[in-house]
Image (tube, coloured by chain):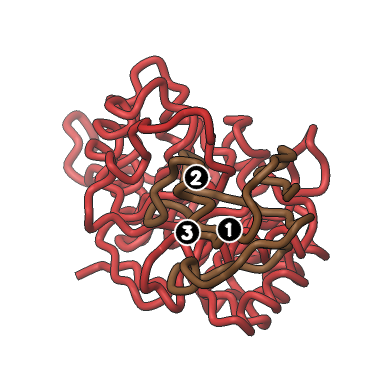
Chain colours: A brown, B red
Amino acid sequence: MQAKVNGEPMELPDGLTVSALLQHLGVRGDRVAVERNGEVVKKARHGEQKLASGDVLEIVTFVGGG
Amino acid sequence: MDELVLGGHRFTSRLVVGTGKYEDFATMKAALEASGAQMVTVAVRRLDLQAKGEASLLHWLPKDMVLLPNTAGCFTAEDAVRTCRLARELQLGGENPLVKLEVLSDPKTLLPDAEETIRAAKQLVAEGFRVLPYINDDPIAAKKLEDSGCVAVMPLGAPIGSGLGLRNPYSLQMILDQAKVPVIVDAGVGTASDCALCMELGVSGLLINTAIAGAKDPVTMARAMKLATEAGRLAYLAGRIPKKLYGSASSPLAGVIGTA
């Protein structure tokens, strides 16, 4: 399925959960926050929240800033 | 004990320091230590999916450092609120996190958009955030934000990164006179004397990033800012003498030799 991750279109396996997406991308889930179609997906729900074709995902972290 | 109480936290340091623009994390860490800061600002950004295994910012911050996530780069209330929700998710367990609300309107001046800032502040307060809004040196906007439930107001001294210092001390004085929440000068500080001046006027704290990170020697400048902030605070508490146009002798006028 097609989804957009951090602004980049990506071809992803069907039926991925948020946890599986992070694993697929090689990202540690405890260090990031995930937003799906404008709504935060809480960490406790990463394992159950399934992604759908056309989803817009943001995976963010803290960086230096003022 | 002269403490700054902000949204449930107690700080003995009145200097809040940014974590942006440092050459490397090691310099940032040393500068933070020299500044004595107990709270630092951080930004929320997309994870670089290509740069796996890079050391994260948080790895370089002391465990007891209070984080103040910002909404830098947001130009609408909606984006600022989304950013704060993500920041809350990034801070495990923090139900009422502090956030620095910053909604800009113009990429050249980087001046805040008061209308969008107030709109976002109301939404964030309703969602339980402890909001510290970055605003113009505008007493009306400051009052509206305070009335919206913000835990502090953070007027600028001058545009972000400009280093122009406190351009309008009289507006700041008006904000200070009316404020019932802490007033923190955010943006504009260029050097140590700017810190002292702001603190002498009675602000509760300062937020500095560029003036430290961009100095030739960030660690030494961080120490200078710390000392100036403390000196300014002490001078404010001590109560300065009134300004007078004419001289007033310090030594006794009586008993001078050679007088009649």
Residues packed near mark 1 inside 10 Å, few (<14), some (14 to 19) or many (20 plus):
some
- B31 over B145 or under it: above or below: above
Q: Amino acid at mark 2?
A: His
Labelled pair 1, 2 in contact (Cβ < 8 Å):
yes
Upstream in the sequence, badge 2 or badge 3?
A: 3
| Residue named by callout 3 | A19
> In the picture, residue A52 is in which quadrant?
bottom right
Q: Residue at x 44, y 44 (%)?
A: A27
Residue B109, position as x, y percentages in the image: 77, 36
Residues packed near mark 3 inside 10 Å, few (<14), some (14 to 19) or many (20 plus):
some
| Residue named by callout 1 | A16
- B220 over B60 or under it: above or below: above
Q: Which chain letter matches label 2?
A: A
Residue B173, position as x, y percentages in the image: 60, 61
Estimate the spatial distance between the alpha carbons at disc 1 and disc 2, rounded to whole Å: 9 Å
Estimate the spatial distance between the alpha carbons at disc 2 and disc 3, rounded to whole Å: 9 Å
Name the secondary structure under disc 1.
loop
Q: Residue at x 47, y 59 (%)?
A: A19
| Residue named by callout 2 | A24
Residue B183, position as x, y percentages in the image: 52, 64
